[in-house]
Image (tube, rainbow, N blue to C red):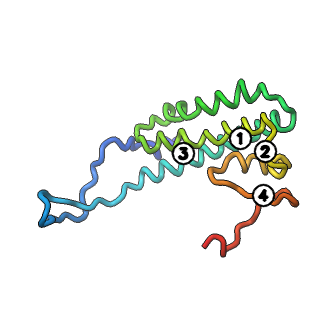
Amino acid sequence: MSILKLVFENKLILDDREPTLEFHLPFLEGKYGLLLPDLSIWNQLIMLLIIQSIICALLGAIIFEFIVKRRMNLIGLGFILPLSIMLPFALITIFDLRSRVLMLSCGTSFVIPFFRCLEAMYGVPSPAVKHSLENYTLYCSCIFEILFDHDKKTPLKVTFKEKM
């Protein structure tokens, strides 16, 4: 927990950076400066995304076990959907987030398990996703879309050529 306190120590309210380069433009009044980026927002953003991915994977495991396999839709209506709406507010309070960028990123990740739960309740996830707990937690925890091989029921591998 001390690592999290250390990462979220800077509240990003006051920008106290000094310009690394100052210059004047002949056609505009005033002095202008270039600021180096503050890395603490990136550290906080990465930590938030890791925490959110873990929580979304846990929610995905609950969705898979109780809704996909056992068709217990009340778990979705009474637990998963309200939890995915309330979790962003809880994380904002726990980490005492003040930056609007971090608050926005905190709120957007939990849209995924919300809609994955609705998808599972109405029985429309693809058969490859419903094949295993591993596939479903991966499907629920990733912000980006994952393609699955419908024959092997595994995630497709990305080649180096496709990455470029």
- State the residue in front, 143 or 95: 143
- Between the residue at mark 1 and the residue at mark 2, the CA separation in whole angstroms equals 8 Å
Which quadrant: the N terminus? top right
Q: Is residue 162 above or below residue 50?
A: below
135 w.r.t. 5: above or below: below
Is label 2 in a helix, a strand or a loop?
loop
Among the two numbered marks 4 and 2 on one chain, the one whose residue lies closer to the N terminus: 2
Task: Quickly name the residue at label 4.
Answer: 148
Residue 39 or residue 108, whichever sits in front:
108
Residue 80 location in percent, x, y? 70, 31
Residue 96 percent across, percent down from the top left: 45, 34
| Dot 1 and dot 2 residues touching (CB under 8 Å) | yes
Give amino acid for label 3.
Leu
Q: Earlier in the sequence, mark 1 or mark 2?
A: 1
Per the model, the C-alpha gap separating discs 3 and 1 is 20 Å
Q: Residues within 10 Å of mark 1 (few under 14, many from 20)?
A: many
Residue under label 1: 116
Q: Residue at x 32, y 60 (%)?
A: 36
The answer to whether the residues at label 3 and label 4 have Cβ atoms under 8 Å apart is no
Residue drawn at the location 59% of the way across and 33% of the way down: 87
Q: Amino acid at mark 1?
A: Arg
Horizontal relation, residue 18 to residue 45: left or right: left
* Residue closer to the observer: 141 or 43: 141
Asked which secondary structure carries label 3, the reply is helix
Q: Type of residue at label 2?
A: Pro
The amino acid type, in three-letter code, at marker 4 is Phe
Disc 2 target residue: 125
Please give the residue where the numbered disc 3 appears in the rendered image.
48
Pick whichever of labels 3 and 4 is earlier in the sequence: 3
Instruction: Determine crowd level at label 2: few under 14, some 14-19, many 20+ residues with C-alpha closer than 10 A.
Output: some
Residue furthest bottom as drawn: 161
